[in-house]
Image (cartoon, rainbow, N blue to C red):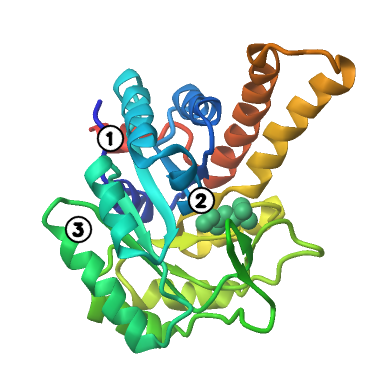
């Protein structure tokens, strides 16, 4: 089937009380691995790329590869642009075939964040594209966005409601204590805050910083109201470690197919585990009915 907008996927997940895994991919093999994981578990899937990967591969290459995967697949798949503050890149991705975009103006004052988000929502509305925005600031490192502890701050539930009302955004990523990258200790997640935000807004909520959150805490986030979980760093590490293992055993290996196959298998297994935590196994049928 064709790529779908993530709006109906996430609204269905919100109503069903489960979460959809959104996985950042950087190569064709990574994309194939997470699609295979979704197919095997019959999970709806959101493929994501960062702006860095868009610049590295080209939005048209990514969108075409995602479309081929989607056409071959029996589960609904959306293609999402992660963390972008550049309107032109967002438009390039929409034109290339992305079905979902994130405008990240969380570094700006509330009013500027509202204005930048509204502009993207208005442009995307006509073509049925899902728009995600961030409120508060998620700490850590994602691509070339670095937010240190001092500048990370949690989203205010009342401001979240006001933000959704003013922007018409389809999905909201409120900062609730997770961070991008691998945690040094345990994350300090404010579960009550997730519940308060979920009670005040009618749109699906997005959990950023999905790498390294203890399993039990992911489950609590889903129960509290998260409908999409972004995972990037952990998948990159799993994929790269599998390649390193091949070279440790055989430093002269020079056939990319030989080291990409175990990397794909490792990534697929890791993605399946995240889908299990999200509670998305078998949920493709919710959307297809
Ligand atoms: P991690 O890199 O911590 O998994 O975060 C991913 C993310 O939130 C992408 O937007």
Residue in the picture at 42% in, 88% down: 109
- Decide: few, some or many residues near mark 2? Use Cα within 10 Å; few <14, some 14-19, many ≥20: some
Quadrant showing the N terminus: top left
Residue 223: image location, x then y, percent: 52, 59
What residue did someone put label 3 on? 124
Residue situated furthest right in the rendering: 249
Q: Quadrant of residue 265?
A: top right
- Please tell me which residue is depicted at 57% across the width and 71% down the height of the picture: 138
Residue labelled with disc 1: 3
Which residue shows up at 75% across the image and 61% down it?
A: 183
Neighbourhood count class around disc 1 (C-alpha, 10 Å): few under 14, some 14–19, many 20 upward? many
Helix, strand, or loop for circle 2? helix
Ligand 1: which quarter? bottom right
- Mark 2 residue CB less than 8 A from any atom of ligand 1: no
Q: Nearer the viewer, residue 113 or 192?
A: 113
Residue occupied by mark 2: 52
Badge 3 crowding class, 10 Å Cα cut-off, few under 14, some 14 to 19, many 20 or more, is: some
Position of residue 194 relative to residue 262, above or below, is below
Is tag 1's residue or tag 3's residue first in the polypeptide sequence? Answer: 1
* For discs 2 and 3, the disc positioned in front in the rendered view: 2
Q: CA distance from mark 2 to mark 3?
A: 22 Å
Would you say residue 48 is visible in this rendering?
Answer: yes
Q: Where does residue 272 sit, x and y in percent of width and height?
A: 58, 32
Along the horizontal axis of the image, is 35 left or right of 145? left
Determine if the C-beta at disc 3 is less than 8 A from ligand 1.
Answer: no
Residue closer to the observer: 215 or 72: 72
**How many numbered marks, from 0 up?**
3
Q: Quarter-wise, where is residue 259 in the image? A: top right
Foreground pick, 180 / 95: 95
């Amino acid at each position: 089937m064709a790529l779908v907008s993530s709006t109906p996927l996430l609204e269905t997940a919100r109503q069903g009380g489960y979460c959809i895994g959104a996985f950042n991919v950087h190569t064709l093999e990574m994309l194939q691995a997470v699609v295979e994981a979704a197919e095997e578990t019959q999970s709806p899937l959101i493929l994501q790329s960062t702006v860095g990967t868009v610049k590295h591969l080209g939005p048209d290459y990514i969108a075409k590869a995602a479309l081929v995967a989607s056409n071959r697949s029996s589960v609904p798949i959306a293609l999402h642009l992660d963390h972008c503050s550049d309107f032109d890149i967002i438009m390039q991705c929409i034109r290339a075939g992305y079905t979902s975009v994130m405008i990240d103006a969380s570094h700006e004052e509330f009013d500027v964040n509202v204005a930048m988000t509204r502009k993207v929502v208005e442009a995307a509305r006509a073509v049925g594209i899902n728009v995600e925005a961030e409120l508060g600031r998620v700490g850590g490192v994602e691509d070339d966005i670095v937010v240190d502890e001092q500048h990370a701050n949690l989203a205010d539930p009342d401001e979240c409601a006001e933000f959704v009302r003013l922007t018409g955004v389809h999905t909201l990523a409120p900062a609730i204590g997770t961070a991008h990258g691998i945690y040094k200790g345990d994350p300090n997640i404010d579960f009550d805050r997730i519940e308060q935000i979920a009670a005040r807004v009618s749109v699906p909520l997005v959990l950023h910083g999905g790498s390294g959150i203890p399993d039990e805490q992911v489950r609590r986030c889903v129960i509290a109201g998260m409908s999409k979980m972004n995972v990037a760093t952990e998948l990159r590490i799993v994929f790269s470690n599998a390649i390193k293992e091949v070279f440790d055993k055989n430093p002269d290996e020079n056939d990319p197919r030989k080291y990409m196959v175990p990397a794909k298998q490792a990534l697929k297994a890791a993605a399946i585990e995240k889908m299990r935590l999200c509670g998305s196994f078998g949920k493709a049928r919710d959307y297809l009915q």
